[in-house]
């Protein structure tokens, strides 16, 4: 889908979808009400080593109680409802040091997982939920390192009408080398179209979100090829401390 037709498609979708112009905050800045935690190797609801916590009004991924990472990939899910058509906005900031034993690629790396599978269905040793990941990256002091990329755990997407060949595809964003707050927005039209937006600039667009790829868990094999029309929203813990705030959503349902 070229840029012109993507634009027209977005306008048409926007015309037919009802709007709710009121922002709803998913994180209240005080506690983790409405959120459930799943960390690899642990049962749903076990906040191993207090990985996810609230501090100074932010939702923080903390490794102060860890000696090493040991593949403890984690996600915190907002489980009050599934979302299908929506506009999500949040701010994130990396801080502190990369945890010993975490993968090298996870330095200043986190993500917002869209259309997530129900965390109740995640396998005990599953690294990532089936989802479309808005990958969040921080700069490393030199060289380009875009943020608001797309990664595809258990999914396939199309970019410019062609199946994305790589697990992660870079956006056109600038690099944020400093550990400052970065605002990111995603605009989601079910399985049809997703935009990643930074500073009012659409830095990535993809379409046709579906179950597939190389990381489909065993209990999802029979769903390969199915459109991913809706799901939960989650935030990642991958080995580098990160904070989130102003997590809010407008629904188009």
Image (cartoon, grey):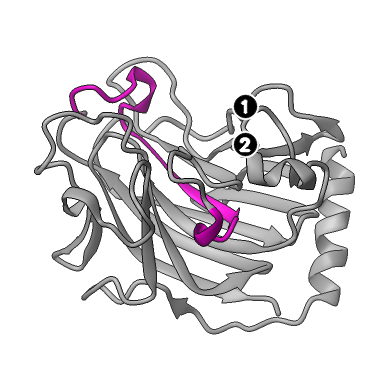
Where is residue 48? Give x, y as percent.
22, 50
The segment highlighted magenta reads 99-121
Q: Is residue 181 visible?
A: yes
1 or 2: tag closer to the N-terminus: 2
Image quarter (top left, top right, bottom left or bottom right) of the C terminus: bottom right
Q: Which residue is mark 1?
A: 167
To which residue does mark 2 refer?
Answer: 152
Residue depicted at 44% across the width and 20% down the height: 144
How far across and how far down the image is residue 126, in percent? 48, 40
Mark 2, Cα crowd under 10 Å, few <14 / some 14-19 / many 20+, is many
Residue 119 colored in magenta in the image: yes
**Outermost residue to the top:** 143
Is residue 216 depicted above or below 19 in this figure? above
Say whether residue 240 is left or right of residue 4: left
Is residue 250 shown left or right of residue 105? right
Q: Where, by quadrant of the figure, is residue 30 drawn? A: bottom left
- Closest to the observer: 175 or 236? 236
Q: Residues within 10 Å of mark 1 (few under 14, many from 20)?
A: some
User: Mark 1 to mark 2: distance in Å?
Assistant: 6 Å
| Whole-percent x, y for residue 203 in the image | 60, 41
């Amino acid at each position: 889908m070229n840029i012109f037709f993507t634009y027209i498609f977005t306008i048409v979708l926007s015309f037919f979808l009802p709007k709710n112009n009121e922002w709803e905050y998913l994180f209240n800045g005080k506690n983790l009400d409405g959120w459930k935690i799943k960390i690899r190797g642990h049962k749903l609801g076990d906040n191993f080593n207090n990985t996810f916590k609230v501090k100074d009004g932010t939702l923080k991924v903390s490794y102060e109680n860890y000696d090493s990472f040991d593949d403890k990939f984690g996600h915190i899910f907002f489980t009050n409802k599934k979302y299908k058509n929506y506009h999500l906005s949040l701010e994130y900031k990396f801080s502190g040091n990369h945890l010993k034993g975490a993968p090298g690629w996870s330095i200043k790396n986190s993500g917002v997982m869209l259309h997530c599978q129900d965390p109740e269905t995640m396998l005990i040793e599953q690294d990532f939920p089936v989802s479309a990941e808005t990958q969040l990256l921080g700069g490393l002091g030199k060289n380009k390192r875009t943020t608001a990329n797309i990664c595809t755990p258990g999914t396939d997407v199309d970019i410019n009408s062609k199946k994305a060949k790589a697990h992660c595809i870079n956006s056109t964003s600038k690099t944020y080398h400093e550990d400052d707050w970065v605002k990111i927005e995603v605009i989601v039209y079910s399985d049809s179209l997703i935009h990643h937006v930074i500073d009012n600039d659409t830095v990535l667009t993809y379409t046709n979100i579906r179950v597939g790829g190389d990381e489909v868990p065993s209990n999802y094999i029979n769903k390969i090829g199915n459109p991913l029309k809706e799901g939960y929203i989650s935030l990642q813990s991958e080995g580098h401390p990160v904070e989130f705030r102003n997590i809010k959503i407008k629904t188009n349902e």
